[in-house]
Image (cartoon, grey):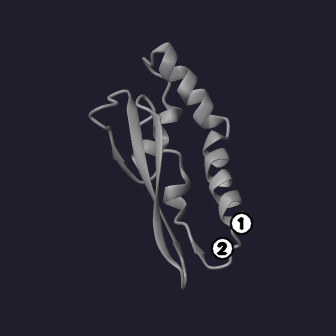
Amino acid sequence: MLVHFLPLLDCYACQRQRVLNILLRSGIVDHVSLRILECLERHDITSNLLFNPNFRYLVGGSEWMPRERPDTSCFRKYIGVRGKGDFTLITPTPGAIG
């Protein structure tokens, strides 16, 4: 939960982190979840969708940094569809976001 407040902090952030904070505030979080929802709509599976609001955040979900890509943070998004099952979406982001 606290990770969602990090973009609000501007103290002692390097230039790269400042740019990432601006992007997070600009609606990129909505952009990612909207693209996921658009994809699900194309397959006509939104009527029974279970997509927890916590997973809609860019940094929402379980996080890890792959050993082979230490500059990347990955987040698991769990999405369910009643009667059709669940699936996991992995979203890689620059490591400084996570």
* 30, 47: nearer the viewer: 47
Mark 2, other Cα within 10 Å: few <14 / some 14–19 / many ≥20: some
Which residue in the structure is indicated by mark 2?
A: 45
Q: Nearer the viewer, residue 68 or 72?
A: 68
Q: Extreme left residue here?
A: 67
Q: Is residue 10 above or below residue 76?
A: above
Q: Residue furthest bottom?
A: 83
| Residue at x-position 47% and y-position 72% | 86
Q: How many marks?
A: 2
Q: Which mark is residue 98?
A: none
Where is the C terminus found, in terms of image quarters? Answer: top left
Q: Residue 96's spot in the image, x, y percent?
A: 42, 28
Task: Left or right? Give the position of 21 relative to 69.
Answer: right
Q: Amino acid at mark 1?
A: Glu
Distance from label 1 to label 2 (Cα)?
6 Å
Name the foreground residue: 61 vs 1. 61
**Amino acid on which disc 2 is placed:** Ile
Query: What residue sits 32% from the left and 29% below the top?
Result: 70
Q: Is residue 54 left or right of residue 46?
A: left
Left or right for 41, reference 88: right
Q: Is residue 80 above or below residue 10?
A: below
Residue 9 horizontal/vertical position (percent)? 48, 30
Numbered circle sitting on residue 41: 1
How far across and down, in percent of the image, does residue 83 sit? 54, 85
Find numbered disc 1 in the image and state the secondary structure of the residue it sits on.
Answer: helix
User: Secondary structure under badge 2?
Assistant: loop
Q: Residue at x 53, y 21 (%)?
A: 18
* Quadrant in the picture for residue 28: top right
Q: Quadrant of residue 24?
A: top right
Q: Pointer 1: residues within 10 angstroms few (<14), some, or many (20+)?
A: few
Q: Is residue 30 above or below residue 23?
A: below
Mark 2 and mark 1 in contact (Cβ < 8 Å)?
yes
